[in-house]
Amino acid sequence: ENHSREVALATLSLSLDEMITRNPRLRSGRPVISGTATSVRAIAIMYKQGLTPEEITGELPLSLAQVYAALAFYHLHTE
């Protein structure tokens, strides 16, 4: 439990640009959550289908901070 808290605190210090990356060899260069192959788009689709961020973390091996970062990135980059 202490380790989880340390990871969560370390994640808080990351900027959105550090949490979301693009790699031309991964997901055709679409933005993904750093260190994963999970695309921002996949998170946004799940959210639009009615899943809460907490439910998304139950479906995918992501932290709540990663899900919120993906949603923030999505909302910042869509019209």
Image (tube, rainbow, N blue to C red):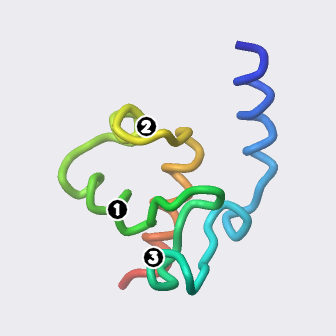
Query: How far apart are labels 1 and 3 at the CA level?
Result: 11 Å
Left or right: residue 45 versus residue 14 is: left
Q: Amino acid at mark 3?
A: Arg
**Residue 29 horizontal/vertical position (percent):** 51, 84
Q: Nearer the viewer, mark 1 or mark 3?
A: 3
Q: Amino acid at mark 2?
A: Thr
Which residue is situated farthest in the top direction here?
Answer: 1
Q: Which mark is residue 59?
A: none
Q: Which residue is mark 3?
A: 27
Query: Image point 56% across, 82% down: which residue?
Result: 25
Residue 4, compared with residue 29, is above or below; it is above
Q: Which residue is mark 1?
A: 42
Left or right: residue 36 versus residue 51 is: right
Residue 57, compared with residue 36, is above or below; it is above
**Residue 22 horizontal/vertical position (percent):** 60, 78
Q: Which mark is residue 57?
A: 2
Query: Are circles 1 and 3 on residues that touch, CB within 8 Å?
Result: no
Query: N-terminal of the two: label 1 or label 3?
Result: 3
Location of the C terminus (image quadrant): bottom left
| Front in this rendered view, residue 46 or 28 | 28
Residue 16, compared with residue 56, is above or below; it is below
Query: Are circles 3 and 2 on residues that touch, CB within 8 Å?
Result: no
Query: Image point 51% across, 61% down: which residue?
Result: 37
